[in-house]
Image (cartoon, grey):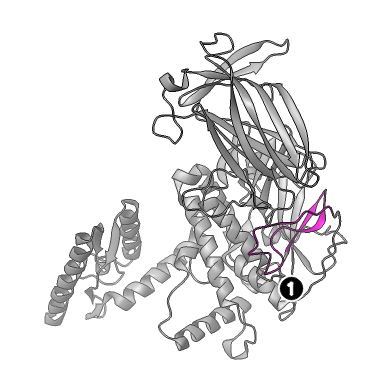
Amino acid sequence: MEGLAKTRASVQKLNNQVVRNLTSHGINAVGISPCITIPTLHAHGGDEHGGMTSLLDSIHAALHADLVPVLHGDAGYYYHLHSTATARTTMTNGILLQNNNDNNNNNSMKCMKNIFGYIPSKSVRRASSSFDSWKTWTKVSATYYAITPKSNTERVNATYFLRASSFWTKIEQWCLDPNISGEHGMEILSSLQNGVTYDQSRFRKIPLGTFKKGKAALEAIFAFSDGQSILGNSARSIFRGILGGYGAYNIITCTTLLDTHTCSKITNIPEQLNDAFVPLAVSMGSNSSQKKFYVQCSTGCILLDAAREIGRHASPQTSSSSTSTTTTSTTTTTTTTTPTDQCCHESALLWFEELANRLTNRQFHVDVIYQKEVAIVQYPSLPSPGYAGGGTIRGKVPITSRAVTRGVEVVASSVLAIEQMQSPFIYSIRIRLLVQGEQGYLPPSERGFDTCQLFSRHWRIRNHDDDSVDRVDGDGVIGMYPLLHEGGYVDHSMEEFGHIVKGDSQKGTFEYRSCCGDVQGSMQGHFTFVPGSLEHPSQGRPFDVLVAPFALERSPLFIF
């Protein structure tokens, strides 16, 4: 026991020094002794049953309190063996064992499992040498393909698996951040299914070695999560689609990443998609028009089955196009894709990486999509600082525009609803009166009013193919005449007999969504506002609030 006493005294001194050094650099570290909670180590508080659970609870509690848990080196006494042991091996094995037990017994656990670890952010470790890296990836391949390492001629693509881990980690962290995704993020996370091995996947009927290049990226993607469960007792399940959606009038669409079980029930693959295709995602909503996404196993490309087009690519299909910032227009209704060496086998990875980036940078965000139902909406919002994405149409019209006139801000953007035949663009207009401290704010004394009310709209829709311009002018916006004030607005609407009636006071930004026809071009215009209100105008003339040009892009690089 003398050796145990001296060892504990030595490691405690080192542990305290580590914590002191961290705190001196501004890191809120707290020491946790693993031997306190290791099962069978009874030296100072461990027990046979609840020890590891207590350790994990301590770690989780520290993380939730914004503390950095530092697991100390330690030593304990094996009561039943009458011997001492350091915590390193016992602690590691204990945590892995406890996690396995938890994952097997707790179906409500809200994290994604995979063949490496238990959540993507914990699935990557740094190899100590080249041999260690080779050995680890050999074991991973054997696990994934369910064959012994010695006879294993199949190898997972390590680069693709690391990239899949990265974007799934971003999605997981987005779902877990209540400040970004709210409660909806947890709904999406709970709908994601566990990752699968090859024999459990949607590719299991395709012999090993077939379409290897095309399937490599897809194998990595579904090893971390096998899609979403779309079965539920409530209509709310259609709004949990991780790929997001849009809504205007009677159009409501939200796209779900399918799991293998659901994919097995889809048999009506279009004849035009005549290679080996596997279902990937499907949109669900209020109207009969749907869009379905398939992956082409020979190339790894994602193709669409929609009312307007069959066989259209939903992500860059060549390596060169994946880095290009320009796009070309297409009016082809049906496309037959022939596998070539030019096909980008990373197409599916690029698609998912773009999704993760749009969520992380708030290009896609959680908002009301229909009545009071919330979902991930695809209308691009203003990018977060430092985000270089978003893009332009033909290098000159932004995807999302912002303009401020006399303190009134208008943010405008559109999304391609490719499944809609007559009006394939749904645009979102967000209008508000800026508050103090925001860029473009003017105090009432400078802008000339405390409140202002929208009276009319004036649109100019430019077709970039022939430079023609369509004009749309009218009163209000979709029957609404919002009265703006700092921090919110009041709903005013046109009743049946042509009278404008006052509605409820609302906080935040007034937003409306509408549709426009098939054009490759841009949209811009202005709203006419009255200082004060329509009923009680204040001194001053009506003024125009600019809507800066925003793109109507018929051929975006990515379609979700």
**Res. 44 in view:** yes
Residue 503: image quadrant is top right
Residue farthest along the right direction in this orientation? 271
Residue 401: image quadrant is top right
Q: Is residue 319 magenta?
A: yes
3 shown above or below 487: below
Which sits in the foreground, 511 or 220?
Answer: 511
Q: Is residue 549 magenta?
A: no
Quadrant location of the N terminus?
Answer: bottom left
Pointer 1 residue: 342
Residue 151 rendering spot, x and y as whole percentages: 62, 90
What is the chief secondary structure element of the magenta stretch? loop
553 sits to left or right of 103:
right
**Number of dots carrying numbers:** 1
What is the span of residues highlighted in magenta in the rendered image? 302-331
Residue at x 73% of width, y 10% of height:
497
Which sits in the foreground, 293 or 388?
Answer: 388
148 sits to left or right of 266:
left
Residue at x 62% of width, y 63% of height:
350
Residue at x 62% of width, y 79% of height:
146
Residue 525 rendering spot, x and y as whole percentages: 66, 32
Label 1 is placed on what type of residue? Gln
480 shown above or below 294: above
Residue 499 rendering spot, x and y as whole percentages: 68, 10
Which sits in the foreground, 456 or 490?
Answer: 456
Q: Secondary structure at mark 1?
A: loop
